[in-house]
Image (cartoon, grey):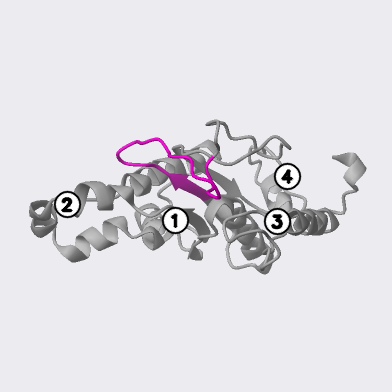
Amino acid sequence: AMDPQQRVFLECAWHALETAGYDPGSGGRVGVFAGTSMSSYLLANLLPRAELTARTGDFQVLLGNDKDFLPTRTSYKLNLKGPSVSVQTACSTSLVAVHLACQSLLAGDCEMALAGGVSVLSPPRGHVYEDGGIFSPDGHCRPFDHRGQGTVNGDGVGAVVLKPLEEALADGDPIRAVIKGSAINNDGSGKVGFTAPSVEGQMSVIGAAQVMARSKPTRI
């Protein structure tokens, strides 16, 4: 009765650690910072079939489908002993998870961190465009593009293994990229609606990230 999102993220976390050169079950002070969507599997497949939930038990169904248990389940299954934090900031969940993981590493709460997110719709479905909604009228998602008109549904999972650069170099780890700085904020009420992004808010957080990274805009 486990949400497919949790199953897929567990597999992705395993592969991420394996790709980084670490035994996924070896334990250690590894933090997990991750988030997922509400379980559509629970709503569409389990709750309408009382015989399934009765056989499994309500508590087990809750443990297998509550999105807040995604990081702690990952820590439990992979014997990871750093902080295990559930993140939910809607569309920015995975990036905020990366930011929080970096902060935890800088604070010394963990030696290494897994950060990421997952979204799987079960059963798969399309979307209906409504005026004032978040969905794109033409079915296309164009991030960071002036032609962007909204988002579309999709399935995906991603996880990265993070470690302080000096330690990664000393340990001979494969380094795919270096995070020079990150920042987070919130738009407050400075936007046209609750689900709308704010140009000013995004400008502010991008500027803050550049300051943290000590990087000039002309270098990007």
Relative side of 169 to 7, left or right: right
The kind of secondary structure element at disc 3 is loop
The kind of secondary structure element at disc 1 is loop
Split into 4 quadrants, where in the image is the C terminus? Answer: top right
Disc 1 or disc 3, which is closer to the eye?
3
Q: Residue at the location (49% across, 49% down)?
A: 117
Disc 3 residue type (three-letter): Ser
Disc 2 residue type (three-letter): Pro
Q: CA distance from mark 4 to mark 1?
A: 24 Å
Foreground residue among 62 and 90: 90
Compare marks 1 and 3 and give the one earlier in the sequence: 1
Q: Total of numbered circles in the picture?
A: 4
Q: Read off the residue under disc 3.
A: 198
Graded by Cα atoms within 10 Å as few (under 14), some (14 to 19) or many (20 or more), the crowding at tag 1 reads: some
Foreground residue among 207 and 212: 207
Mark seen at residue 27? 1
What's the magenta bit mostly, secondary-structure-wise?
loop
Question: Are circles 1 and 3 on residues that touch, CB within 8 Å?
Answer: no
Magenta-highlighted residues: 116-135
Residue 81 place in picture, x, y as percent: 46, 63
Q: CA distance from mark 1 to mark 2?
A: 38 Å
Q: Residue at the location (75% across, 53% down)?
A: 199
Q: CA distance from mark 2 to mark 3?
A: 39 Å
Disc 4 or disc 2, which is closer to the eye?
2
Compare marks 2 and 3 and give the one earlier in the sequence: 2
Residue 114 in sight: no
Mark seen at residue 74? none
Mark seen at residue 178? 4
